[in-house]
Image: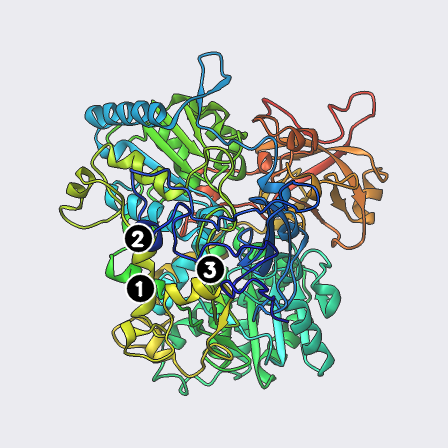
Amino acid sequence: MPVPHPSGGPSGVTTTTLIPPIGRGSHPRGGTDAAARHGWLSLDNSNRPRVPAHHVPPSPELGDPVPATTQHHSWCGICEAGCGLIATVTDGRLASVRPDPEHPASQGFLCSKGMAIPALLDDPDRVTRPMRRRPDGTFEPVGWDEAMDDIGARLQAVVDRHGKESVGIVMGNPSVQNYASFLAGLLLGAALDNRNLYTAASVDINNYYVVNELLYGHNLTTPIPDFVRTDFALVLGANPLVSHGSMATLGRVRDHLAELVDRGGRLVVVDPRRTETARLGEHVGIRPGGDPWFLAALLHVLFRDGLVDTAAGERTVRGVGFVADLVADVDLDRAAAESGIPVATLEELAHALAGARSATVYGRCGASLGRFSTLTKYFLDVLAVVTGNMDRLGGMLFPDPYLDAELLTKVLGLHGYDRWRTRVDDFPEVLGMSPLASLAREITTPGTGQVRALVSLASNFGWTSANPQALQDALPQLDLFVSLDPYITGTNHCADYVLPPSMILEREGFPVFAQLHASVPNAHWSEAVVAPRGEARNDAWIMSEIFRRIGVVPLPLPGAGLLSKLPGHLPFALISDLAMRVGRHGDLFGLRRGGLRRRDLVADGRARRYAEHPPAGVLRSRVHHRDRRIHLDHPVFATEMARLVGSPADAGAHDGFPLRLFTIRELRSQNSWLHNVADLMSAGRTLRLRVHPDDARSRGLAAADTVRVTSPWGAIEVTVEITDEVMAGSVGMPAHWGHRAGSWRRARRGGGAHYNDLTPDAADQVDRASGNAWLNGIPVELARVPADTATGPATALQGVR
């Protein structure tokens, strides 16, 4: 139901004070601040968001002020779901949040991570002042001017000596939830034009961006599953009941999938573990790393049995014959051995997929973290295409975002694939980015373009990347390392500076990433709810201020560097507003009645639904290739298929390491950065390695034993949980525990082992087509550790590599 506004103020805010808050767009000291209203990040103010100010009248009974309490519609920026919430603010502090029942997609749902936002903002270990590392490795607070002057001088010295090609940028996962930060990082990386932009996408998403570019003509053209209207949902390596959807913003996904089963449809979850999602439908266990073999087998059966109409799609698809040739010689017996799925099951699923009235084919992290993840993503999309389920209701739909990032990045020349290669490992560029798997070697390998200075934006990349030890050894060799992060972590504890960014609800914005993949098209743009703690500032301001000192502004256009001499910074809110207003749902500056614009969305505060669902039958208007057809026949896929078929059989590829390790997503974690929040680490929460009873029995393991997990690349010790929810021959463990450095005390006390210590980063041990890391299907073996010799209940073993 609507949130009331008894004071008569803006509809997006409720206040219980006797005096209404200042109107939106007003300056707390009176008058209108145009710079703040239009998003200017200027040097002549503190870049602190404009939050409602309140006059607190005295209590007539006690003579004390009455606490000012306001309520604000906003959204959760922790994961991709962008769920709606209502924030309660008391005396300028975020007191609580609760789900927003009016939000078109989440409809009153908010998970434990979102509910913990007040604890996150108030974390006593949070960095709230600029911190400079002393020679002894400890940190001291400094002022912003002192920090920026020193960073600017040192960065300019690096550029003078080694050129701008020696400067790198790393962007972490949280930056995609902060539109200004997201734009600043991408645009600065493009403006540097030096092949040293690294992002978290190269851990698990670059395969999407490669396939999107080659099939549809743009990295960001991502089909999403229409679970609401489908008759058959094939889910590979995804657990949307826990993730709430990744590369697909699914709203109340549990309800949608339960309704699918209730109406007689099929939900088939293919995963090494009987996940929360799998328990709603049918579970098919798969050997970790077997995903491309599973999908290739399905396609082989479809073509073999004449279940593909090769002529029907000629107007919209190019290369169906190429796919037929690609899978013609797939050996079903080998596919069954590699995937752990019997031939009969493979054939049944292929026929069921082809025979369904409508079908979705969705895969995510489990399918995105293998050695052949680009080929896996390609096969997923091809399955939808050749069964007639691409661009149709109940199948895979092209999203309809309100800010057309495809157009924006196209205009700025940011999208593309393989326009250049990385210096050391010869990886193809993806959306202007290099893979994190190569960063350590780019830092340590001499030559033109060697990374000598690094600015990290909301990233714990030295902990979440493959073979993190290589990065932790490389980072101290930099001439300058600056990190924008709310914590001192296992990555930035060796940084020269750690600078405090504003966080969720402390900045205005919209869910830029969620809206790109929304199954419920809705527009939401909200103001800051509270002021940042301490001296924290918006990431975009910090990044712009750092790079203006070397004459670089976040605009990859000729002569743009001259703007660095002018006061103020690029108005990211204005740019985004313009892009929205000229888009498919914008107001065209008043020419389209009821169209979207930032001012109206911010004034309302609530999410606005602008379509019932993403449209169908729009393929020719959404594909960017000149012929407006999907291109299935790029030679990179033939190369990857040859690499797959030519690889040794998995069962004998790593003698002495018979088990396969895979990652498990946890509801109360978001990669590595929520382990310091008390609300999310309660009830004795610890890390466990999940082992099938047969594998435990054959190794003499009992519940709660400590085991040594060894791979060809490292070893850890961790506590065992014995469960039949994982398939025999596979072991599962959440990633990014085991924090050993930094100022976040609760995260370090949480213990646990570090999954990524078991993973490789060599150029031939990642997905060659995209540079994606290899994190799933890692060959391992287990051995019980006697209680008197265990290094701890769960820990990493140093010096193993």
Q: Which residue is painted at 47% across and 66% down in the image?
A: 604
- Marks 2 and 3, the one that precedes in the sequence: 2
Q: Image quadrant for the C terminus?
A: top right
Q: Which residue occupies 60% across, 25% down?
A: 800
Three-letter code, disc 1? Ala
Task: Please tell me in which quadrant of the rendered image residue 232 appears.
Answer: bottom right
Location of residue 617 in the rendering, given as x and y in whole percent from the top left corner: 42, 84
Badge 3 is on which residue? 375
Q: How many callouts does the rendering have?
A: 3
Q: Is residue 290 visible?
A: no
Secondary structure at badge 3 equals: helix
Image vertical order of residue 344 relative to residue 552, above or below: below
Tell me which label, 1 or 2, sits earlier in the chain: 2
Mark 2 Cα within 10 Å, few/some/many (few <14, many 20+)? few
Viewer-nearest of labels 2 and 3? 2
The residue nearer to you, when weighing 231 against 176, is: 176
Q: Relative to residue 90, is residue 175 drawn left or right? A: left
The circle drawn on residue 579 is: 1
The image quadrant where one finds the N terminus is: bottom right
SS of the residue at dot 2? Answer: helix
Asked whether disc 1 touches disc 2, contact meaning CB atoms under 8 Å apart, the reply is no
**Residue located beneath label 2 in the image:** 34
* The furthest residue to the front: 60
Mark earlier in primary sequence (1, 3): 3
